[in-house]
Image (cartoon, rainbow, N blue to C red):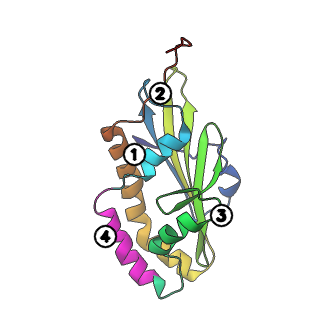
Amino acid sequence: MRAVAPPPRSGLAALYPGADLADAYAIALPATASGDVEALARAVFGRPPPWFNGLMAVRDAAMARFGVKTARRLRRAGPAATDGRFIDFFRIRDRTDTELVVGEDDRHLDFRASVMLCPQPDGGRDLVATTVVHCHNRLGRSYLAVILPFHRLIVRGNLRRAAQAGWPAARITSGCAP
C-alpha cells in the first residue's frame, strides 16, 4: 500500500481544488479479486479495525454537543433512508462501474470518500481510496486537525485488513449450462 495523488478521473476530482484534505492510498489487487466496486468498497469500509468503534464512540460523545451528526445517528437513519444505500454509516452518494463514492454533509464540514479501480500499465489493478474534506468553519478545521492522524491510520488499516481478509473473488462464468 502506498500514498498516491488523488486520481484525476475520479468523480471527486471537481472537489480537489480548495479542499482542506485531499489524499489517496492505493493497494494492488490480486488478479482473482472481483471487479465489483461495491463489493470491494464493502470489504474496505465494512471491516474497520477493532479500536475504530471505540474511537467513534469518543468522537460521537464529543461532537454531539456541537450538533454534529454522529455515527450512531447515521447508522440508525441508514435503514430508514429512502434509498437505503449505506455501507455501515457511510451514505453511498454515487456509483459507476469503476468507482463508489460515500459521504456526508454536515454543518462543520462536507466529507467524501471514494474507492476506485485503477488499471495499471502492467495489466494489474489498484484499488485507490480517496478522501476529500471541505471545512465550513472553525469547528470543521479544528475537528479535521484532531482526527487527521487517525484518518490516515484508519484508511491504511482498512485497506490492509481487507487485503488480509481476502478480497471478494471475481465471478467466473463459463457460458456453459450448469
Query: The residue tagged with tag 4: helix, strand or loop?
Result: helix
The secondary structure that most of the magenta stretch takes on is: helix
Q: Are marks 2 and 1 in contact (CB under 8 Å)?
A: no
Q: Residues within 10 Å of mark 1 (few under 14, many from 20)?
A: many
Q: Which residue is mark 2?
A: 170
Look at the numbered disc 3 and give the secondary structure of its residue: loop
Q: Which residue is mark 1?
A: 159
Q: Are marks 3 and 1 in contact (CB under 8 Å)?
A: no
Marks 4 and 2, Cα distance to the nearest angstrom? 33 Å
Q: Earlier in the sequence, mark 4 or mark 2?
A: 4
Measure the alpha-carbon separation of dots 2 and 1: 18 Å
Q: Upstream in the sequence, badge 2 or badge 1?
A: 1
Q: Is residue 19 magenta?
A: no
**What amino acid is at disc 3?**
Thr
Tell me which amino acid carries mark 2. Ala
Residue 100 visible in the picture: yes
Which segment did they paint magenta? 49-63
Element on which disc 2 rests: loop
Using the image, tell me which numbered label, if any, was put on residue 54: 4
What whole-number distance in Å separates the C-alpha atoms at marks 3 and 2?
A: 30 Å
Residue farthest to the bottom, as pictured: 65
- At 49% from the left edge and 26% from the top edge, which residue is drawn? 171
Tell me the mark number nearer the camera, choosing from 3 and 1: 3
Residue 111 visible in image:
no
Quarter of the image with the N terminus in it: top left
Q: Which mark is nearer the camera, 4 or 2?
A: 2
Residue 14 locus on image (x, y percent): 71, 53
Q: Nearest to the eye among marks 2 and 1: give it.
A: 2
